[in-house]
Amino acid sequence: MSCEDIQESLSLYCDDGLAPEARASCYQHLEVCPVCRAHLAELRSIRQSLAMLPRPSVPADLVPAINHALIAEAAARDVRSHVTFADVISELLWPRVTRYAFSSVASLLLFASVFLALRPQLIALNEAVRAFDAALTMSDSIDPSARYDINRPISPESYSALRAPFNAESPSLNPSGALASLGRSSVATTNGRRPDADDMMVVADVFSNGAASLADVMRAPRDPRMLEDFQKALRQDAAFVPAELDRRPGTMRVVYSVHRVDVHDRNY
């Protein structure tokens, strides 16, 4: 036998676990191989060291713990032997019912939260419809296809009802305010001629009572008097309708564009 073949049999040789033929072959190899004899001596030394180790003592509560476990298992087996068909059905359905009930409650809470979030918009839409219906009963015609008479004044309530879908985004101009009549009060030049076409773009802050103030000038007009007339119209009276008519936030910042055109028709 070679050293590689005998390495697997040395532990059994040390414990007297080999057959007589295998043991004789190992013995013959050990007589001529000092390396295997040294390895066998190490195995015997380890075996003797392990034999000298103290045997662990059994815990004092091991027997009572085993008895309690056996009693509990016997009681559980007795309970399972008395399980009825209704108990089996309940055990099978309870997890599913609990899961579906939780899903249903979560769906109801989600629907309620969405409804509560949309409730102010629904109320505002209902009030806008009521205001529109009320405006229909007024003397002012608010039919979009109707032709308006520029000499016939329109009330702020009717004009605000006309812009009901857009009131929350931009304030409604006060039709009886000085800003609405700014285009009709064109400034004459020193020679008596009508002014040329001009335009400007400004930023204004609109407050809850309809008053406004100039915040910034984005594009100044060529004629400075046009900007002066605009500021004078803002200071004269409320340029926009109150916030409660538009159902808009109390203070808004808007971009206002003014275009002045030269109309050559004398009959205008």
Image (cartoon, rainbow, N blue to C red):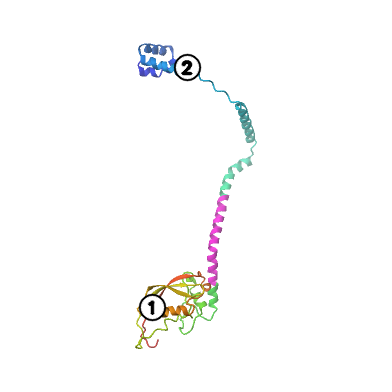
Amino acid at circle 2: Gln
Q: Quadrant of residue 87?
A: top right
At label 1, counting other C-alpha atoms closer than 10 Å, the crowd grade (few under 14, some 14-19, many 20 or more) is few
The residue under the point 44% across, 13% down is 19
Mark number displayed over residue 128: none
Task: Check disc 1 and report the residue beneath it.
Answer: 259
Secondary structure beneath dot 2 equals helix
Residue 179, visible in the rendered structure: no
Asked if 72 appears above or below 107 in the picture, the reply is: above
Magenta region's main secondary structure?
helix
- The residue carrying mark 2 is 48
Specify start and end residues of the magenta stretch as a single range. 101-129
Position of residue 49 measured from the top left corner of the image (x, y, whole percent): 47, 18
Label 1: state its secondary structure: strand
Residue 210, position in %: x, y? 50, 75
Depicted 108 relative to depicted 90: above or below: below
The percent coordinates of residue 42 (x first, y second) are 42, 17
Q: Residue at x 60, y 42 (%)?
A: 91
Q: Quadrant of the C terminus?
A: bottom left
Image quarter in which the N terminus is found: top left
**Up-down: is 260 above or below 46?**
below
In front: 104, or 8? Answer: 8
Image x and y of residue 65, in percent: 61, 29
